[in-house]
Image: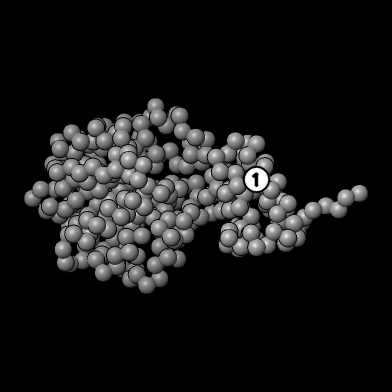
Amino acid sequence: MHPVDNTLLAYLTKAEDFLRKKNLEKPRLDAQLIFSHILGIERVRLFMEYDRPLSTEEIDAMRNLTVERAAGKPIAHLLGSKEFYSRKFMVNSHVLIPRPETEELVDIAKDIISRSGQGKKTLLDMGTGSGVIGITLVLEKPESIQKLILADISTQALDVCRENFYRLCPDVPENSVVFLQTNLFESLDDSWHGQLDLILSNPPYILPDEYETLETDVKDYEPRIALTHPDMESFYRSFFSSARLFLSPDAPLLLESSPTLIPLLLPLAEENGLHKPQIYRDLSGKERFISWQKIG
């Protein structure tokens, strides 16, 4: 009888082969992330510990997570976190999993803030989800932000956002951040009219017919309300009309969007008093972000 090979390399290879047979896009990376998570080590250390024998408990845990991944559960949900702008943010099924493109939205926002001159700003991250946009900006530009409003319709999403803020921002004054449960701008007090220096958002931008074609690990595990809306025109008309009320004179609104939706947004924004649209392409060359300015 041959001895059982219970080394890290043996089981890592088995997991990768299993995930590949399930036609996952990145079976090797997924297997490595699962194993580094269970073992509590950086992924790079896996290669230095190939001969490490695994315990029965470790093997069972790895097997369970590998089976869940093969069934379509996102790797970020299995690990409970996702890296964004070199920081680890907690995520779960109540929030969108951060995408690399949204890091580019943060880059654009940082540039807008830097070009806006001296003085601390009041920012609103609408539909904040896990808080990656607003929290990253307050950490990247602490000298420029006086007040940050993190708003979402979902109380469960705001719970995730709070946890990320308190874990990642121990040095940010608690009174400089507002967590607001609201359906768009409905619960934002009238005293904020004309007071916001920048509104940012990664709102629903997948058209309903596009939503039905999404991959299983998106459609079945991420909140539909954050991805799409049954009446995009009505949603964005309300968004733009309210955003204009709360923006200070000449202040910008910056959104992440999609090439298919931007043509719909341009006339709606113009109708609701937002002008000077500027479209930005993502690293793949797609029209992905758009900003407007409230004039006067």
Quarter assignment of residue 141 = bottom left
Quarter assignment of residue 87 = bottom left
x, y percent for residue 226 = 39, 42
Residue 58 in view here: no
- Local crowd size for mark 1, using a 10 Å CA cut-off: few (<14), some (14–19), many (≥20): many
What residue lies at 60% left-to-right and 57% top-to-bottom?
Answer: 37
| Residue placed under numbered mark 1 in the picture | 16
From the viewer's perspective, is 22 left or right of 102?
right
x, y percent for residue 175 = 31, 68
Viewer-proximal residue among 126 and 252 = 252
Residue farthest to the left, as pictured: 296
x, y percent for residue 86 = 43, 60
x, y percent for residue 260 = 31, 32
From the viewer's perspective, is 90 left or right of 17?
left
User: Does residue 75 lie above or below 139 as drawn?
Assistant: above
User: Does residue 184 lie above or below 5 as drawn?
Assistant: above
- What residue type is disc 1 on? Glu
What residue lies at 32% left-to-right and 54% top-to-bottom?
Answer: 106
From the viewer's perspective, is 280 left or right of 66?
left
Viewer-proximal residue among 31 and 128 = 31
User: Does residue 21 lie above or below 48 as drawn?
Assistant: above
What residue lies at 16% left-to-right and 53% top-to-bottom?
Answer: 251
What residue lies at 25% left-to-right and 65% top-to-bottom?
Answer: 145
